[in-house]
Amino acid sequence: MQNLLDPAILFFVFGVLAGLLKSNLEIPPQISRFLALYLLMALGLKGGFALAESGLTTEVASSLACAVALAVAVPAIGYRVLRRFVSPFDALAVAATYGSVSAVTFITAVQYLETHGLAFGGHMAAAMALMESPAIILAVVLANTVRQQAAATRGVSLGASGAALAAGGLKSGGISIGKVLHESFTDGAQLLLLGAMAVGMLSGDAGHTAMKPFVGDLFKGLLAFFLLDMGLTAARNMPAVRGKSPLLLAYAVLAPLAHAGLALGLSLMAGLGAGNASLLMVLAASASYIAVPAVLRHAVPEASPSLYFGMSLGITFPLNILLGIPVYIHLAHAVIAP
């Protein structure tokens, strides 16, 4: 309940209500983009300052290894589950969306930990960056595989001319893995996050002192402003999931819990601290609503954007912001000794 009384969370709730009431309240896209970039830059600087103080430790390496393992396992498992009740393209699109991460959910969790005086490692921002791309790459590989299988099937049924036609369609419909890798690792938001971490590490205590008003005093207010915008956006995407299969709606609610449980298990095996484990749970439980949907619209046009975008932003994101974050953090600190 205390989490729901946080000003940033209350602004998110206000945004959802305003959106559901079809208010004309709107944050200009340029302002929203600036807020997102500011939050990533501030988060990167915080992480860099923390790494400059702690250095590279065994827990840093273990946390990053767990993040990469989750980034591969979650979408792979999700695809195998989802393909049983939706088309292969929709299955891989939803799996990729839930296999990637939400920066805003992570930033909100960081703010929650800081507000409650709970320790965590600044390197977890790097873990977030590592978890974004594997799901996208897996989705493209799976999409190309499904297209090849469909082309082979059409070739068998239509003969040699059909096989040639199918192969031509495959060539035009596929997408280069190299291109996906380039776009993933040169994405402006991700580069800003990693660049800010590097600046924080190099500048150390002197940089922390100089940038304290920027990354400290302004952070909470601008996060609240951005969550207001996200509340409006989430409310306007909730109708997209109406009429969808109850199994998909259940997946949007239950899959994040399963992913968080998997992250907790990995954290226990790797010996991570409670703060880092809770952030790993938040990352595993979150779903992308910016980076992955943007790539999927072009890389997997056969999938339905209203499905994967509506599920992630209309259901999973609000649940994580309002209820999931405090639950994951409380559970991690209850299971793992400080």
Image: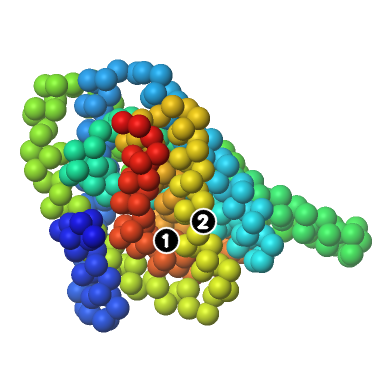
The answer to whether residue 291 is visible is no
For label 1, count other residues whose C-alpha is less than 10 Å away and answer few (under 14), some (14-19) or many (20+).
Answer: many
State yes or no: discs 2 and 1 in contact (Cβ < 8 Å): yes
Q: Picture coordinates of residue 283 (x, y %)?
A: 41, 45
Q: Regarding mark 1 in the picture, which secondary structure is present there?
A: helix
**307 or 260: nearer the viewer:** 260
Disc with the residue nearer the chain's start (2 vs 1): 2
Q: Residue at x 15, y 39 (%)?
A: 215
Quarter of the image with the C terminus in it: top left
Number of on-image labels: 2
Quarter of the image with the N terminus in it: bottom left
Q: Picture coordinates of residue 321 (x, y %)?
A: 31, 57
Q: Residue at x 52, y 66 (%)?
A: 250
Instruction: From the viewer's perspective, tell me whether residue 258 is left or right of residue 277.
Output: right
For label 2, count other residues whose C-alpha is less than 10 Å away and answer few (under 14), some (14-19) or many (20+).
Answer: many
Can you tell which quarter of the image residue 85 is in? bottom right
Instruction: From the viewer's perspective, tell me whether residue 314 is left or right of residue 142.
Output: left
Residue 316's disc number: 1
Q: Residue at x 56, y 73 (%)?
A: 246
Q: Residue at x 33, y 46 (%)?
A: 330
**317 or 32: nearer the viewer:** 317
**196 or 224: nearer the viewer:** 224
Q: Amino acid at mark 2?
A: Ala
Q: Regarding mark 2 in the picture, which secondary structure is present there?
A: helix
**281 or 179: nearer the viewer:** 281
Can you tell which quarter of the image residue 322 is in? bottom left
Q: Is residue 60 above or below residue 325?
A: above
Q: Name the residue carrying label 2.
A: 255
Q: Is residue 175 above or below residue 233?
A: above
